[in-house]
Image (cartoon, grey):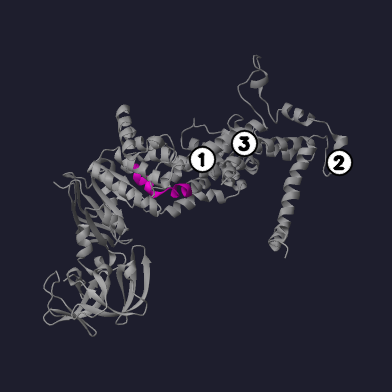
Amino acid sequence: MHSVSVKNLTLKFGAAEVLKNLNLDVSEGEFIVLLGPSGCGKSTLLNCLAGLLELSEGQIWIKGKNVTWAEPSERGIGMVFQSYALYPQMTVRGNMSFGLKIAGMAKDEIEKRVQRASEILQIGPLLDRKPGALSGGQRQRVAIGRALVREVDVFLFDEPLSNLDAKLRSELRVELKRLHNRLKNTMIYVTHDQIEALTLADRIAIMRGGIIQQLDEPHTIYNRPTNLFVAGFIGSPAMNFIKGATVNGGKTFQFGDVALDLAGYEGGAILDRSKVILGLRPEHLSIVEQAIPGQSIPAVVEIDEPMGADSLVWLEVEGKQMSVRVPFEHRPQAGAKVHLKVDIAKASLFDETNEQRI
Amino acid sequence: MDRPNPLFRNLWSKIAALPMMLIVLVVFVGGTAWTVLFSFTNIKIVPIFTPREWVNGFIGLANYQRLFNTDRWMNCPGLTHIGRSDWEPTCMGALPNVVTYVILAVVLSMSLGFVLAVLMDQKIRAEGLFRTIYLYPFALSFIVTGHVWAWIMSPEYGLQASVRAMGWTSFDFGWIADRHMVMYAIAVAGIWQGTGLVMALMLAGLRGIDEDIWKAARVDGIPAWRTYLQIVLPMMKPVLVTTFVIVCSGAVRIYDLVVALTDGGPGISSDVPTRYVYTNFSANLGQSLSASTVMLVTMAVLLIPWIRMEFGKKSQG
């Protein structure tokens, strides 16, 4: 039985299809991240799961129950919002207990749940304060606490860390991962931050235009992007793309005067194609002095961007820019003529006409 | 080079603001001070401006004493005749009248305005049209409102006459001819005129509430009415305070509506302080000034705490 199951979900606002015939199965205890650029429909999908938006077509099942038309409070979900959405005139305790009180729960049971949640989130000392007296990080903990006391099966997070500064964001990110390890609930998490997605997710769903482009483990998404969009969206610094063609029965990638041997590429049948894009991540290239026939590309060093441990070196290749990640102490001189060794086993080839991975 | 004198920074803006500042100083502050000062004298006519005449005419609190002994200003047998046979549970006169009116206007137009704003907030069709309809009375002059309601509520040819003509001969709606009910009649007209504005202000306040609060409340299973009352309404405090100040100050100043609707009648049972001040202005200036001062002090006592609460904390950062 799936924890959450989305079946042929379509959502229309007037004539515009915001979500298009979407399917998604989430297993018990899984941490799924919905990732995509703004306007891709990820938050909309989350709102549909929560029951805050009515579907045009399709069904939503949670814990083996069809909840397509159920009220948000009856779905067995808790939700955390980007703006925290705390009730400002109530104390932290009030924020966490108000929903339970309305539901008619016994006082000591409410108190027990609030105590447990505040212990897990370490917000015990804040219970009698109002949200206005809390920092952003504390507010978001309280918001998580409000979802926690509902003791539900599924947690929905709508960009919960986006309003926090960088340091706090990385701290809370780790805490969320700990929380998931401890509670083992199903969590569905919306973000536009790929670091959050890669670090937190069991599986990432990359969305664009109301369609899930790829649903896979972070490692697979990163190394085997299914199409050009996913390849370009995931990874920072971004993947290098080289336009060219495959010749010689799909054994060679040709662009300009450069020919790269494709033996060792992991993918489908390459064949001879006239329009192909080769995708190379900056860390899958290395700088060498001597050309290696069929495995290297001649390049001229332009500038480098030191990034602490590494340095991102920008080079000119056939009139285009490419970036390579090298250890800081190995960065070359500007203007140097070097060669880029390609690790073809980690490269991605895309058909330019349909943008799909070969 | 010397540091430039801060007095001359933005010199032209200061020069441009000067006439307005002078007007405020002379007309507002000066006029108010003159009113308060000469309310302690026995002057009968304007203009008297000199300190010598203030000293010569000084009679202390006599005007105030007389004012509160005047039935037309305040007549509360309930307060002074307790235990006597002519004891009455009601207060009559201009001051109690305006208190009644202010309480009714504030309570009813604010609660009605809020309810209308909530109804308007339900993503209804043609919201713009309804908003215009509700705001329309606010565009009318109080004189027009007063006359229209005078016709509607007139016992001889208004609502009462029409309903009786239809057969309900016992139907009674003679509020403006009844000295105990006339202030309620005035309040009906005033609330009809003012509620639209309250609704517009409250609607703006409702729209300013973060959408996520609503979502969180729905996930928490809180019914919509409780969300409005227990979560959204307390969040609208700044709007509520602003609305309260606007409604309250408008209600205290009520004059033209009373003149057009009842002209203080029947008798003097719907007299209000502004009208009292105006009718005493030529014959009994000292009385008039002391009545104005009473209103000023009342307003100050009512509004200053609110204003300090609202604007005071912002200046602290």
Q: Nearer the viewer, mark 1 or mark 2?
A: 2
Tell me residue B13's x, y (percent).
68, 61
Q: Give me the chain letter of mark 3.
A: B
**Badge 3 density bin: few <14, some 14–19, many ≥20, Cα 10 Å:** some
- Amino acid at dot 1: Met
Comparing B104 with B52, the one in front is B52
Q: What SS does tag 1 mark?
A: helix
- Amino acid type shown at disc 3: Leu
Image disc number at residue B110: 1
Of the image marks 2 and 3, the number of the one nearer the N terminus: 2
Front disc: 3 or 1: 3
Residue found at x 74% / y 43%: B32
- Residue pointed to by mark 3: B302
Q: Secondary structure at mark 2?
A: helix
Q: Main secondary structure of the magenta part?
A: helix
Magenta highlight range: B203-217
- Closer to the N terminus: mark 1 or mark 2? 2
Q: In the rendered structure, which disc, 3 or 1, sits on the residue that comes first in sequence?
A: 1
Q: Is residue A352 magenta?
A: no
> Would you place residue B165 above or below residue A227 in this image?
above
* Real-space Cα separation, disc 2 to disc 3, in angstroms: 31 Å
* Amino acid under disc 2: Pro
Q: Would you call the spot at circle 1 few (<14 residues within 10 Å), some (14-19), or many (20 or more)? A: many
Residue B178 as seen in the image, left or right of residue B32? left
Task: Tell me how many marks there are.
Answer: 3
Q: CA distance from mark 1 to mark 2?
A: 46 Å
How far apart in space, not on screen, are marks 3 and 1 (Cα)? 17 Å
